[in-house]
Image (spheres, grey):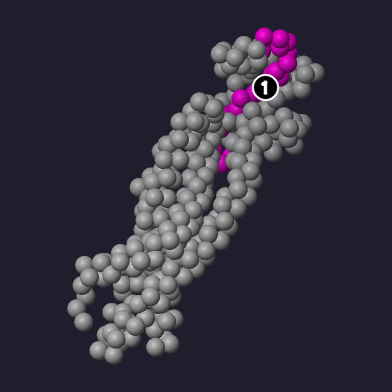
Amino acid sequence: MRFNFGFFLREALKNIRLNLLMSITAITTTFICIVVLGVGLLASSHVEGVIGSVREDVSVEAYFPPDATDEEIGEITNTVEGWPEVASVNYISEEEALATFKETFADRPELYENLDPGVLPASLQIQLENPTEAEVVAQRLEEDQGFSDENLSYPQQTIDRLNSLTSAMIWGLYGATILFLISSILLISNAIRLSIFARRKEIEVMKLVGASDSFVRTPFVFEGMVQGLIGAGLAALTVVWLNFLFIDWARDALPFVPISGDAVNTILILLVLVVVGVAIGVLGSFLSVTRYLRKV
């Protein structure tokens, strides 16, 4: 039989209308599934963006203990300057550190108005020739110059901390997505099963007059596809809207965290979420109608 897109689409919409409550339930579950998946993708993209920004600002900060003498500081500075991995070394005194802190938080004087000049330690800001050498330089500072790990700050530390803090959250979101994914497929499958039950006599007649399984199956697959498309489309738009809200919020609440809208490929996120939603609908409906056709 000839493939008639308009006919199959009309049949799908009619089935949705006849089983409206079940269809709304399936669409809602798909919506939740895709939103959770989208939030996971957003979190992963923003973490990767922050990590990329951190890697671009490659330096190692080595903080001197309060009892370090000028001679010790000068000796360490000269030694570090001679390392082949080091591009430049900048010594920051306690006074300069406090002045920088005051400049950074100029709009919040309550943070520094009662601070003593020596509350922030003197440090070396070490610029590297190669970003990948940060951990090597940090290890040499620990082993050769006596710095403890607590007195060192470098990009790999920040990256490791970001990964450890966010990996559990992201995997939790993906785990929830899998649960909602299964629920969506089952709900769409049940919605299609109700449509099949309501039209079982019509299907039997179609089979008697020679209709193929694919002809009988297609309207129900279209029904599942439409349900998945509606749920995924609404969810994808919601995820993009949440991303814009998050970026606006982060610019005010997290001014020192390099969060950028460029970290997320909005078009790609939209396409992925819609494709996954449609796949959920098609798979759920296909499984349901195929199972029924094996019995008739």
- The percent coordinates of residue 153 (x first, y second) are 65, 32
**Few, some or many residues within 10 Å of mark 1 (<14, 14–19, 20+):** many
Which quarter of the picture shows residue 295? bottom left
Residue occupying the point 38% across, 72% down? 195
Q: Is residue 124 magenta?
A: yes
Whether 207 is drawn above or below 50: the answer is below
**x, y percentage for residue 50?**
52, 38
Query: Front-most of 105 and 251?
Result: 251
In the rendered image, the quadrant that contains the N terminus is bottom left
Residue drawn where x is 62% and y is 34% of the image? 154
In the image, taking residue 210 as reference, residue 32 lies left or right, namely: right
- Of residues 262 and 58, the one drawn nearer to the viewer in this rendering: 262
In the rendered image, which residue does mark 1 sit on?
123
Magenta stretch bounds? 112-133
Q: In the figure, is residue 131 to the left or right of 79?
A: left
Q: Who's the residue at 65% across and 23% down the image?
A: 124
Q: Amino acid at mark 1?
A: Ser
In magenta stretch: residue 236: no
